[in-house]
Amino acid sequence: MTRELGVGILGCGNISTTYFSLAPLFKGIEVRACADINVNAAEAKAAEFNVRAETVEELLADDEIDVIVNLTIPAAHYAVSRAILEAGKHVYSEKPLVLSLEEGEELRRIAREKGLSVGCAPDTFLGGAHQLARDYIDRGGIGRITSGACYVMGPGMEMWHPNPDFFFLPGGGPILDMGPYYIANLINLIGPVKRVGAMTSMATATRTISSQPRSGETIEVKTPTTVQALLEFESGATVTLSASWDVWSHRHANMELYGTEGSIYVPDPNFFGGPVEVSGRDKDIRALEGWDHPFGIDNQEHPHAMVANYRTAGLADMAMALIEGRDARCSLDRALHAVDVMTSILKSGEERRFVALSTTCTQPAALGIEEARALLK
C-alpha cells in the first residue's frame, strides 16, 4: 500500500480553504494539522476540516507531519520555508517561492544539506487543457515554437480582496502575483528562459479600496503595476508577456504560441481547464479535440461558469515523487528559475537593459491521462 505523507498547513487565510477541500482527492497526502499566527483562524479551519489546530512551533515539531504547506504572505515565504526546512520537514510553498534569487539559493542549500524537498505552486499547468496543449506541441502539431504573446491584465485587486495592501508592495504587483502562472506554463510548454527585457510603470501612486470591510481607505503603490516584458527562451523562441493592473478591459487572448507549422491558443494558465484551439498553415482556427484528462473536468462553481480546479495536484505529485524516488513536476529548480525570470523582468524595467538569467531548469515531465489518474485516490 502506498505510504501517505502527513501534511500541515501553515497560514489559514483565503487560499487555505482550497488546500483543505481538495487534498482528499489525492493519493500520498493527508492533511493532519494547521497553524496560523492568528490562533482563531487556525482553530476555525481545524474545526471546519476536522484536523488539529496547533501553534506554529507545535506544527514545526509535530512528528506526524512530513511536509508543511507554506500559505503565508509572499514577504514571509522565505523565512517561513527556511524555518520549516530547519525543523526537518519538506516544504510546499504557495507562489512565488521567494522574492529574490539569493533567498531561493539559500533554501536550496539547506534542503540539499538536510536531504529535504521543496516544491512550489502554481500547479495549474498540470491541468487537462495545458497538458493537452503540451501533448499537441510535443507531437509537432505547430512545428518548432518561434514566438508567442501572453496577456494577464485587469483593474487590480482592491475591488474584491478584503486586505489588498500586499499586492501593491514590493513582492506583489502583477508579475510576482500573476506571472508565476504564465511563466510556469511557458516552462511547461517551451522550456527554460535565457534572458529578458522589460519596461515597467504604474498608473497611480495610490489606490482606493472599494471592497469590504475597508472600502474608502487609500493605500500606497510601491511596485510597478504595468509590465511589458520580452522573454527569450533557450530554444530560441521569443515571447511577449504583458501584465497589468491598470487595464479596465481588453480583447487579448491569454496565451498564443506560434510555430513553424501553425499556432496554438492556450486558455488562462490561472485555471486547469478551458478550450485549446489550433491552426495550421491553412490559417483555419479550430478547437483541439479534448481528451479524458481527469484534471480538465469542471468541478467547481466560479462567478462566471463552472471550472476545473485541482489545486493541490502539485503537492500530491511532490509527495508521490518522494515516495517513488522521482522528480517532482513543481520542483524547486523550476520555481527558482521562475523567480529568476520574474525578478530579472523587474530589474530590467528598473535598469532599462536586458538581463541574462543565471539559472536554468528542465521542462517538467508531461502529465498524461494515466499519470494524472495515478495521483487520484
Image (cartoon, grey):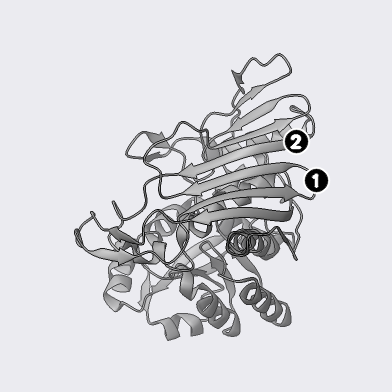
x, y percent for residue 161: 31, 56
Report the amino acid beneath label 1. Ser
Q: Secondary structure at mark 1?
A: loop
Q: Residue at x 39, y 35 (%)?
A: 306
Furthest-front residue in this view: 352
Number of on-image labels: 2
User: In the image shown, does 62 or 122 lie closer to the viewer?
Assistant: 122
Q: From the image, tell me which residue sits under label 1.
A: 235
Q: Which mark is residue 126?
A: none
Q: From the image, tell me which residue sits under label 2.
A: 145
Q: Are marks 1 and 2 in contact (CB under 8 Å)?
A: yes
Q: Residue at x 75, y 66 (%)?
A: 358
x, y percent for residue 211: 23, 55
Q: Could you tell which of marks 1 and 2 lies nearer the N-terminus?
A: 2
**Quadrant of the image for the N terminus?**
bottom right
User: In the image shown, does 124 or 42 lie closer to the viewer?
Assistant: 124
Q: Residue at x 65, y 46 (%)?
A: 186
Using the rendered image of the protein, determine whether residue 221 is visible from the camera's viewpoint.
Answer: yes
Task: Relative to 75, say whether 308 is above or below.
Answer: above
